[in-house]
Amino acid sequence: MGHYALRMAAVRTFAVIDFVLAAIAGLGALFFIGVLAFAVFWSGDTGQELAAGVVGVVLFLLPFAVATVLYLAAGIGLLRRRPWGYYLHAAGAVLAMFTVVGIVYTVFAIAYALRDDFKAEFFRL
């Protein structure tokens, strides 16, 4: 496999990983949307209890929603070879660092993203 083919494979691989991470985060977001619906319509809580429950669920939902959008946009940007896709991919790799499994991904994603041949796919070097 040639040098260019390896670069292409790396970009596609990281894009697919970003899409998988977007799907996982999306499932988390859907779970908390379900919890929010239960809290509002069927929990029986009223007043301050309901407000506190809604605020708590939204605080858990927000990171999943942001991660879903971030990873989805990063994957699209990587496949289209856009500079913003490169930056979103790096930002997503840093966010993944806050999970146990994501630490390993962060090391490889950042290390590979800093290579000149990977950057060349997105910027004129």
Image (cartoon, helix red, strand yellow):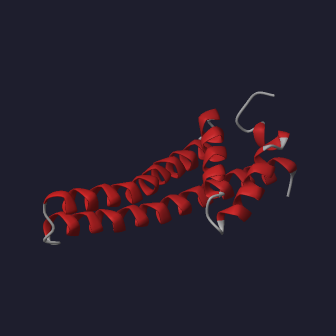
Point out residue 68 in the picture as x, y percentages from the top left corner: 46, 54
Query: Going by the picture, which residue comes out furthest to the front?
Result: 48
Tell me the residue at 60%/50% (across/down): 92
Query: Would you place residue 6 above or below residue 34 in this image?
Result: above
Taking the image as shown, residue 103 lies to the left or right of residue 60, namely: right
**Residue in the image at 35% along x and 68% along y:** 31
Q: Quick one: 109 or 34, which is closer to the camera? A: 34
Q: Identify the residue at the far bottom of this view.
A: 43
Instruction: Determine the image quadrant of residue 107.
Output: bottom right
Q: Is residue 121 above or below residue 66?
A: above
40 and 51: which one is in front? Answer: 51
Residue at the location (83% across, 44% down)? 115
Q: The C terminus is located in which quarter? A: top right
Name the residue nearer the viewer: 112 or 35: 35
Residue 34 location in percent, x, y? 28, 67
* Residue 64 image point, x, y percent: 45, 57
Q: Is residue 45 left or right of residue 112?
A: left
Q: How many labels, in total?
A: 0
Image position of 31 (left or right of 100): left
User: Residue 30 placed where, x, y %?
Assistant: 35, 64
